[in-house]
Image (cartoon, grey):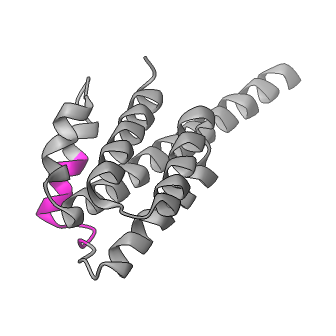
Amino acid sequence: MNKNIQLVSILYEFTLAFCKRYVVSPTQVRLILNSATGAKKELKTSYLAELQDKYQDFLDKNDLEAWPEYSLRLRSVRGIAFRPFCTLLMYKPFLSSPERATNAAICLIKQIDFRLEAERGKSALDYKGTLLLNEI
């Protein structure tokens, strides 16, 4: 399975579990899940950005701490995605509190977004390389 698809599937399942535990408003649940579903089905950065905004709003509205970019807490989240095979089970400990869950989800979204952007850049380079070879 493609690593990006694997990570987006984990993010979707993580978001479902997050909503069941921490989101009270049915409207909010629907909005969050719509973004997560869009990201899962289409692998577009726009859906990921939308989902990240929803998680950021949750942090702000609930007066929770956004973890610093290079904190040890985020390192532990980041490390999971670099494993050859990862599952939702590896992310489950981060569902223990709303703050941990939200920061873990935002981190995972950023990782997926980074991977998608890198993949797009690689595709563009491959395409340009093909053009140059054809012109010779």
Q: Residue 47: x and y, percent?
A: 59, 51
Report which quarter residue 67 is drawn in: bottom left
Percent of width and height locating residue 117: 56, 46
Q: Position of residue 122 (x, y in %)?
A: 59, 36
Q: Is residue 35 left or right of residue 15?
A: right
Residue at 36% over, 63% down: 24
Q: Is residue 55 left or right of residue 118?
A: left
Q: Residue shown at 42%/32% (left/top)?
A: 9
Measuring from the top left, give residue 18's x and y in whole percent.
31, 51
- Residue at image position (26%, 53%) is 21
Q: In this rendering, is residue 3 above or below 45?
A: above
In the image, is residue 123 above or below residue 58?
above
Q: Quadrant of the N terminus?
A: top left
Relative side of 10 to 94, left or right: right
Residue extending farthest right:
135
Judge left or right: residue 25 versus residue 124.
Answer: left
Whether the magenta-drawn stretch holds residue 68 is answered as: yes
Residue 98 to residue 90: above or below: below
Highlighted range, magenta: 67-78
Q: Is residue 71 magenta?
A: yes
- The single residue placed furthest to the top in the displayed view is 1
In the image, 14 versus 47, the foreground residue is 14
Q: Residue at x 46, y 55 (%)?
A: 29
| The C terminus - image quarter | top right
Count of numbered circles in the view: 0
Q: Quadrant of residue 119?
A: top right
